[in-house]
Image: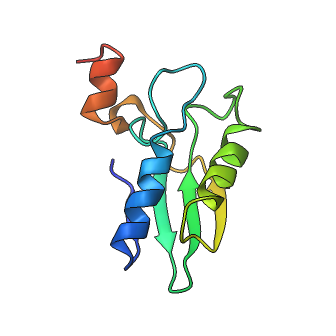
Amino acid sequence: MPATIISDNIELTQRVIDVLKTIYDPEIPVDIWELGLIYEIRIDSENNLLVRMTLTSPNCPVAETLPAETEEKLGSVEGVSTSKVELTFEPPWERDMMSEVAQLELGFM
């Protein structure tokens, strides 16, 4: 399931995605973008960024740290005014939300 992107700023959106591809769940050797953990990227006309993301499970050991790390790294993206990460578990993450790249990396294809 690809992320919903709500933004008129294509260059800034790409910079945000590029940063998301540098953030990893420490237990899985695939970035959070390819894992399908990002549900929505929203950038308003003032370049305020909102990212809705999930975790592989509500009991994920990085539930406290991964969203905060993501918010911090996204806040440093050139052009982003403010960044906010909202954690959601609706819909629950499933393995088929991973990209083909992630599935190949983890041996599921």
Horizontal and vertical percent position of residue 16: 47, 58
Q: How many marks?
A: 0
The residue most toward the right is 64
The quadrant of the image that shows the C terminus is top left
Q: Is residue 20 above or below residue 85?
A: above
Q: Quadrant of residue 77?
A: bottom right
- Residue at screen point 59% across, 56% down: 74
- Residue at screen point 63% across, 58% down: 76
On the picture, is 75 further left or further right than 28? Answer: right
Q: In terms of depth relative to the viewer, which is nearer, 101 or 47?
A: 47
- Residue at screen point 42% across, 49% down: 18
The residue most toward the top is 107
Horizontal and vertical percent position of residue 33: 43, 43
Colour scheme of the picture: rainbow
Q: Is residue 28 above or below residue 62?
A: above
Q: Is residue 81 above or below residue 92?
A: below
On the picture, is 4 further left or further right than 70? Answer: left
Horizontal and vertical percent position of residue 27: 58, 19
Horizontal and vertical percent position of residue 42: 49, 70
The residue most toward the front is 78
On the picture, is 61 further left or further right than 104? Answer: right
Q: Quadrant of residue 25?
A: top right
